[in-house]
């Protein structure tokens, strides 16, 4: 009996998504987020990203830590490295610190 109700709910949801123009196969995919630690070294002569372990990175950026310029450079560098949009990267903790915790949302 429970399976029949679940099947009915799934069919109804697929029908509603189809009516809305959404692909039902895409709606079953949940986006995942990853938290990483990044030690930022601003005002470097060159940009470099070093992977310390799977969740920790060391990033050198050319920008100075003035008015959020280094943070924007961090977001740009990480978006290029992880191949995601800049809007999918968010500084969770440490916006005014060299040690940051960054959330990366994958589509």
Image: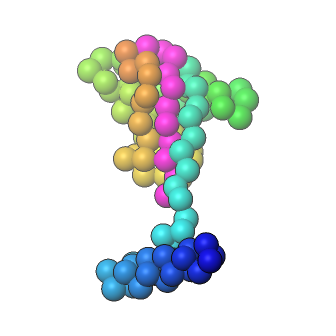
Please tell me whether residue 52 is drawn above or below residue 35 in the rendered image: above
The percent position of residue 35, horizontal first and vertical second, equals: 56, 34
| Quadrant in which residue 53 is drawn | top right
In front of the other: 99 or 13: 13
| Quadrant in which residue 51 is drawn | top right
The residue lying furthest to the right in this view is 53
Image coloring type: rainbow
Instruction: Give the number of marks.
Output: 0
Please tell me whether residue 29 is drawn above or below residue 20 in the rendered image: above
The percent position of residue 12, horizontal first and vertical second, equals: 43, 81
Q: What stretch is highlighted in magenta?
A: 97-107
Task: Say if residue 55 shows up in the picture.
Answer: yes
Please tell me which residue is depicted at 49% across the width and 36% down the height of the picture.
103
Please tell me whether residue 6 is drawn above or below residue 59 in the rendered image: below
The residue lying furthest to the left in this view is 67
The percent position of residue 4, horizontal first and vertical second, equals: 59, 80
Q: Is residue 89 left or right of residue 7?
A: left
Please tell me which residue is depicted at 71% across the width and 26% down the height of the picture.
52
Please tell me which residue is depicted at 44% across the width and 77% down the height of the picture.
13
Please tell me which residue is depicted at 66% across the width and 32% down the height of the picture.
55
The residue lying furthest to the front in this view is 1
Task: Say if residue 73 shows up in the picture.
Answer: no
From the image, give the main secondary structure of the stretch colored magenta. strand
Q: In this view, does 85 lie to the left or right of 34?
A: left
The percent position of residue 67, horizontal first and vertical second, equals: 26, 21
Q: In this view, does 57 lie to the left or right of 30?
A: right
| Quadrant in which residue 1 is drawn | bottom right
**Residue 30 lies in magenta, yes or no?**
no
């Amino acid at each position: 009996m429970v399976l029949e109700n679940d099947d009915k709910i799934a069919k109804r949801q697929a029908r509603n998504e189809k009516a809305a123009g959404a692909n039902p196969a895409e709606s079953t995919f949940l986006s995942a987020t990853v938290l990483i630690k990044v030690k930022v070294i601003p005002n470097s002569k060159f940009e470099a990203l070093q992977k310390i372990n799977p969740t920790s990175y060391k990033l050198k950026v050319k920008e100075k830590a003035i008015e959020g310029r280094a943070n924007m450079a961090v977001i740009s560098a990480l978006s290029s490295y992880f191949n995601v949009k800049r809007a999918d990267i968010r500084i969770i903790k440490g916006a005014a610190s060299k040690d940051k915790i960054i959330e990366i949302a994958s589509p």
